[in-house]
Amino acid sequence: MMIDGILEKAVAGQRLSPDEGLALLQSRQLTRIGAAAHAVTQRLHPEPYRTYNIDRNINYTNICTAVCDFCAFYRSPRSDEGYVLPMDELLRKVEETVALGGNQILLQGGLHPRFRLEWYEEMLRTIKQRFPEVNIHGFSPPEIYHFTKVNKLPLREVLARLQAAGLGSLPGGGAEILVDRVRRAITRGKVLTDDWLEVMRQWHLLGGKSSATMMFGHVETLAERIEHLERIRRLQDETGGFTAFICWTFQPDHTAMSHVPPAGAYEYLLNQAVARLYLDNVPNIQSSWVTQGLKIGQLALLYGANDMGSLMIEENVVAEAGTVHYLTLDQIRAAIEQLGYTPRQRDVFYRLVPEQLERYAVEANRRRDSQPVLPVVAV
């Protein structure tokens, strides 16, 4: 398949059509598409550095009323394995994150059937009172939509109240593939496409920022991957609220979809490179070394990514599916340096952390990594 014209168009900064995006995925010409994606990244990010973040994914509960065939983490409300983190444990986790130079927590849980909005507001206020400098990147669109149903409140009111209580930004979790056919095939009791996007739209209209994500390599078609990117791009045209896009391959182990063959590194790099070419209005692309490992995570910086993602002091959801890649901060920084860039720590809004704080984080993580016992869950 001849894709020269499509690649030239994207590198020049012209917008690709859905048919052109699909043609790139169908061509399977990874090297050429990757080179074009890297050229676009160089145009958008000519700076001599590549970035990373330090945060912690705190799953405050695994109790969830939705049934997602791809998820090994959730437990039903009747399960003996369900939990809700006590506040003192949650605060301890935030404190450890700050001690390692982290400036953010990723706060996500399941769709708990009983908690009222006041419970979440109190959690946010307590964290912010104790750690005012920490950004709370919390509550994915499925959680927010669930809050509106449990509390019988308008979406905008729920978001405004959470924002007032201390919510700083929204993660893009729960997107999977933003096509209803796919969503209905792999999950029950969870928000569909238009409502996922509406959560993001209303958050952006309140002045909030968020990330966009994509989990692929399961039951979706190539055309549906492009439809997902198209929906993200349209909303970004409207609001400009997405700071970054992150994609990763479905991890089938220990899930109800364990029969699905896992997508490999080739598919991951191809999809990310096409995403960089297609999402001309999303400024940043994050590598997903958490699912791909160090070498492919590093290679992703040559296939459209300008950011290595987070150190992730703790991660539980992907780990439950059997994918446990652990990197030290020195490994992340070395991966960036080996490609000829300067590693720089940033926050969720892609502002660079002052260099003295960055140096503190490096030393704090080296002290931790020199200890004989690694964190219980580190991905």
Image: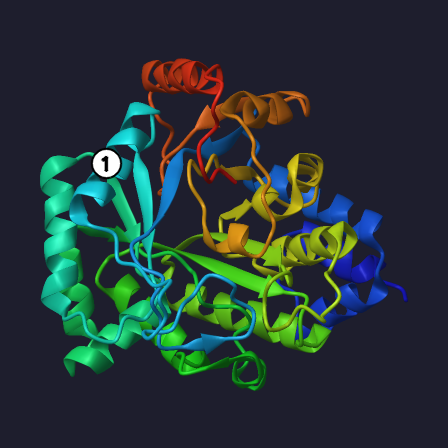
Q: Residue at x 54, y 45 (%)?
A: 286
- Nearest the viewer among 244 and 151 is 151
Q: Residue at x 47, y 55 (%)?
A: 317
Can residue 341 be spotted in the picture?
A: no
Q: Position of residue 263 (x, y in %)?
A: 73, 60
Colour theme: rainbow
Q: Position of residue 70 (x, y in %)?
A: 56, 69
Q: Is residue 371 above or below residue 45?
A: above
Q: How many marks?
A: 1
- The answer to whether residue 278 is left or right of residue 139 is right
Residue neighbourhood size for the residue with mark 1, other residues' Cα within 10 Å, grouped as few (<14), some (14–19), many (≥20): few
- Nearest the viewer among 59 and 350 is 59
| Corner quadrant of residue 192 | bottom left
Q: Secondary structure at mark 1?
A: helix
Q: Amino acid at mark 1?
A: Arg
- The answer to whether residue 371 is left or right of residue 291 is left
Q: Residue at x 28, y 69 (%)?
A: 144
- The answer to whether residue 263 is left or right of residue 145 is right
Query: On the rendered image, what quadrant is the N terminus found in?
Result: bottom right
Residue extending farthest to the right is 1
Q: Is residue 157 above or below residue 109?
A: below
- Nearest the viewer among 104 and 345 is 104
- The answer to whether residue 83 is left or right of residue 296 is left
Q: Position of residue 119 (x, y in %)?
A: 13, 62
Can residue 84 be spotted in the picture?
A: yes
Q: Report which residue position mark 1 lands on.
A: 92
Q: Residue at x 56, y 35 (%)?
A: 326
